[in-house]
Image (spheres, rainbow, N blue to C red):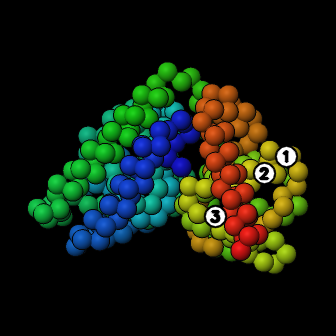
Amino acid sequence: MLALTDIADDILLLYKNTKLATEELIEKISNIHEILVDSGTNLDSFSKEYDFIYIKEGVYKCFYNNKLLRFYSENDLLYIKNFPLNFSIVGEFGTTIIPFSFCSISANLLNDFINILDIENKINLYLLSVNIHNDINIQPELKLYSKGDIITNEGDYPDMIYEMISGEASVIKSDQIIGKINAGEIFGEISFLNECSRTATVVADSRCEVITIKKEIFSNLIKEKPQFLLSISKTLAKRVNSLNNKITS
């Protein structure tokens, strides 16, 4: 998830493509090192020593005037010099980042980095424009799961809906893996909407950071952001198609 707001499909596609390009560029830079960052750290604290931060593992919340604007996750690149005072980027859990400066970038890669930063700037301007007149301050809870942790249990009461921000999980029923959940996918929506017990167990295959959206937040979301309901509808349609394909094959 990029943000809890109505996001145009072309913006989402641009965002995904930028992540892939950033990952490829980082692999071409030498003499850079990973740093483990404690929970609650504001990335602005690195701005005196570095120009950029590449998020290797973990999720950050970006706030504008104390209001949640967007999420940053794996393979996102941030330019942190001259950070605006009304912005903050904070991780709720420990993360792994790669901070570096302009001098680490070879001349033949510099234009590629500038293009990525230009796209990031346009995405942030877009998010600001769609949120500037929105008085609702939605604060979903972010949860961290380690490999092997149970995210939801079959038979549990469905008091929330989930979205995978980073990581991958397996959907298990009768000791059989019946599906996979990847980053960016919503899950738990069927039992949540039908108000029936969970029909399967979801187990983390890796470190997973998951947004949990409770009923009261969900009600505000579909009232103020009807596009979120459309996202759920698309998820349901994909699941139905996948099930049909399994049946016919």
Q: In x, y percent, where is residue 187? A: 69, 55
Residue visible at 70% across and 51% down? 236
Query: Badge 3 local density, few (<14 within 10 Å), some, or many (20+)?
Result: some
Residue visible at 63% across and 27% down? 224
Disc 3: which residue? 181
Answer yes or no: is residue 195 visible: yes
Outermost residue, left direction?
A: 107
Between 56 and 154, the residue placed more toward the observer is 154
Q: In x, y percent, where is residue 49? A: 25, 55
Q: Secondary structure at mark 1?
A: helix
Q: CA distance from mark 2 to mark 3?
A: 14 Å
Q: Amino acid at mark 1?
A: Asn
Between 107 and 100, the residue placed more toward the observer is 107
Between 199 and 110, the residue placed more toward the observer is 199
Q: Would residue 224 be found to the left or right of residue 99 on screen?
A: right
Q: Secondary structure at mark 2?
A: helix
Outermost residue, front direction?
A: 248
Q: In x, y percent, where is residue 147? A: 63, 73
Q: Amino acid at mark 3?
A: Ile
Disc 1: which residue? 194
Q: Earlier in the sequence, mark 2 or mark 3?
A: 3
The answer to whether the residue labelled 3 contacts the one labelled 1, judged by CB atoms less than 8 Å apart, is no
Q: Would residue 178 be found to the left or right of residue 235 on screen?
A: right
Residue visible at 49% across and 46% down? 2
Q: CA distance from mark 3 to mark 1?
A: 20 Å
The answer to whether the residue labelled 2 contacts the one labelled 1, judged by CB atoms less than 8 Å apart, is yes
Total numbered labels: 3
Query: Badge 2 local density, few (<14 within 10 Å), some, or many (20+)?
Result: some
Q: In x, y percent, where is residue 81? A: 26, 45
Q: Would residue 186 be found to the left or right of residue 96 on screen?
A: right
Disc 2: which residue? 190
